[in-house]
Amino acid sequence: MRYRSDRVFATLFGVVLIFSIATPALAAETSNSEFVIIQEGEVFPDDLYAGAIRVVIDGTLDGDLVAFAAEEIVINGVVEGSVTAVSPKVTIRGEVTGSLRVTGNNLEVDGDVGGDVVAAVVSAYLAPSSQVGGDVLLWAWDATALGSIGMDLTGTQRNLALAGSVEGDVDVSVASLTIVDPLTVTGDLGFRSQAEAAGLDMAEVGGAVVEKEVLPANLRVRAIGLLGRILITIVLSVAALSAAYGWPGRTERAIGEAGRNPIGKWLRGALVLFSPLLAAGVTGLILGLAPAAVAFPLLAVLVPVVLALAGVTLALAVVAGAPIAGWLGGVAFKRLDRYGAILAGSLIIGAMWWIPVVGWLVPLVVLPWGLGAWMSSWRDQSSEESSLEPVERSANS
């Protein structure tokens, strides 16, 4: 079925979109302004690449549309081609003769799409009056499909509400599936879920109703994950030993600090390590409260700051666990030297990381705790140097 090729497309969607916006075709028109509007009755005779706060098509676009909008993209008119859209909200009330590719927060289709619909969104709504000529492939938290779908409905959704008609097959992975109104499926109605579907008595299915078992974790994926953890453990162990070799005195002080007031050190380190998330949240809040006219300039200033902060914390995280590894190895094996204790502690931490269910807590505990120990060792050294200065001055005199 064609949805398999669409899955490949969706994987590369972001890269293609960025490339398309950055390098528009020679025959296309590029627009970068606060608002891009094709008014009712107007015909735009070319492809359009648009970056704006809002993009509104009330007239006719005789070509493809590739658009990024900070607020929304609305198509009330006709696009005689395909649409590739990135925006918090995308609304189709008119007609798209080609395919529709969307990523964002909310997608609403209350019109016609001649080709396929591929969307990665939080919420997707296909109204009862909507008509899609091709496949519908949805990755969404909440999805509602009440209109007419000309081919297959596939994808993964947390909650899926179905009605209307599907001329091909339904093959979805969901947490909950609900048939809310009469549904006609020409092919098979297949779903993979841990819960039973609701409202199946309202579905008229030409093929078979197939309730599939939830797939177990793929062995190859689990093997790759295990190999990744082993490699990360090795890399972090080497980084910890390198830090101990390069800064032996500082490392000894950090190891000594690791066992003193661990909660306080964890809080101090967590404040630093989680600062990119805090900065990203503040950035989102500022952009949400700021007027739309200044959204793009703020985005251009704040996003590089957040990315730079994330890079710094990532570099710190590489050696953050060294004091905890040294302290843990020293507690477990009393006779080991500094390097042996760090290596032994790294192996213990790595083994704890592999424990199912609770293993994900290990980096959340070790990395902030270790960074707090490093910070305390720096403070202690500064205090020692400041206390020695008067003694040195008196000795010299």
Image (cartoon, rainbow, N blue to C red):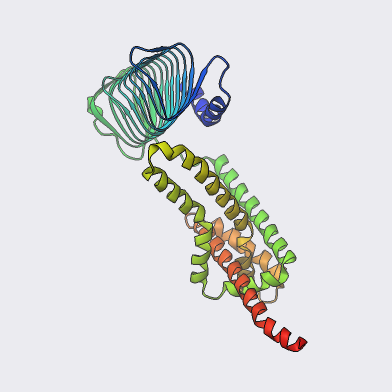
Query: Could you tell me which residue is drawn at 42 percent across and 19 percent down?
Result: 116
Relative to 8, 182 lies left or right:
left
Where, by quadrant of the figure, is residue 154 drawn?
top left
Q: Residue 314: horizontal and vertical position, in percent?
A: 59, 53
- State the quadrant of the C terminus: bottom right
- In the image, is residue 227 above or below residue 92? below
Q: Residue 294: horizontal and vertical position, in percent?
A: 43, 39
Q: Residue 192: horizontal and vertical position, in percent?
A: 38, 34
Residue pushed farthest right? 396
Q: Residue 137: horizontal and vertical position, in percent?
A: 42, 26
Towards the viewer: 174 or 280 = 280
- In the image, is residue 239 above or below residue 163? below
Where, by quadrant of the figure, is residue 387 drawn?
bottom right
Relative to 140, 180 lies left or right:
left
Residue 132 seen:
no
Query: Could you tell me which residue is drawn at 28 percent across and 24 percent down?
Result: 127
Towards the viewer: 196 or 257 = 257
Residue 127 seen:
yes
